[in-house]
Amino acid sequence: MVNQKVNLNGLQLKNPVLTASGTFGFGEEFTDFMELSRIGGIIVKGTTIRHREGNPYPRMAETASGMLNAVGLQNKGVEYFANTIYPRIKDFDTNVLVNVSGSTIEDYVQTAEIIQDLENIPGIELNISCPNVKSGGMTFGTSCVEAAKVVEAVRRVYKKHLMVKLTPNVTDITEIAKAVEAAGADSVSLINTLLGMAINAEKRIPVLSTITGGLSGACVKPIALRMVWQTARAVKIPVVGLGGISSASDAVEFLLAGASAIQVGTANFIDPAISQKIAAGIVEYCERHGFQSVKELTGALIIEDKITSCTV
């Protein structure tokens, strides 16, 4: 029997598979397709201090091997979540984390304080990396100083697990990771979407109302994998990898690169039961390769130390 349990700096997961915010609703939408108890946890859609309508339509577009989105954190606010959604999902037999976003540091702090009081929410994912809002979001995630400020402020009021979601739209993601680690993050998740755009050539207009949006799906996996590998070598806190994971093999690659757990995102739109299948596939991989526990996979990538030369 393979031990599937993972400890994310105090956050206990029954296995390393989580679902990514914005792709799994509040979890209840998927109960007809899979058993939520079969995965390590779900991260509910982005939540802010006040109601947000999001961006105008059109705000989604399919691309080759992926998709663009510019939803803009549409949600009914944290009070609505606490009073209406939380009672419906608090007894799920898995971890439920809340993705928290804001336009100001005060927004993040106030939202975290409200969620702090929800007994069955063991942690939050601090979203400092959303590319689809005009203020806040990625503004915090592209500066070491600003990223540290928001994490420090939330850390002062939030005592449960604090995961920080990082943007790939930076020169060196490891510097941001080290800054939030020093500021009190318990773990980091990466990557959020890459900034991209699509154009309707016949009409000569952008496809998205916001012109640019966040690119996700299989096409971003090599970039996400590289950034997870770099970050896992740069910080001591656990790394949660995401970006283009659509199979157990993909998930194992992220674990080998240094991730302690993974998140499944865009693939949920293709197969609503994919996260459960990935969890089972990781166990099957461990059995085939003689691993006694899933955590043995983390950082188990074999890299030969040899010099290669190139001749013209």
Image (cartoon, helix red, strand yellow):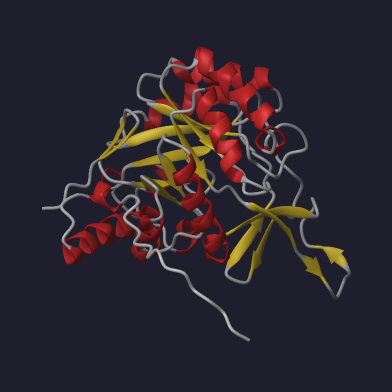
**Quarter assignment of residue 194:** bottom right
The image position of residue 63, as x and y in percent, is: 65, 68
Instruction: Name the outermost residue toward the left.
Output: 1
Give how far across and how far down residue 140 sits, in percent: 68, 32
The quadrant where residue 130 appears: top right
256 horizontally vs 224: left or right: left
Residue 93 as seen in the image, left or right of residue 243: left
Q: Position of residue 217 (x, y in %)?
A: 55, 61
Asked whether 83 or 144 is in front, the reply is 144
Residue farthest along the right direction in this orientation: 204
Query: Can residue 222 be seen in the rendering of this structure?
Result: yes
Q: Please tell me which residue lies in front, 304 or 166.
A: 304
Residue 49 seen in the figure: no
In this view, the residue in front, 101 or 176, is 176
* Rendered view: 27 above or below 87: below
Outermost residue on the bottom side: it is: 312
Is 203 situated above or below 128? below
The reply, left or right, for residue 177 in relation to residue 282 is right
Which image quarter is the C terminus in? bottom right
Q: Residue at x 19, y 49 (%)?
A: 293
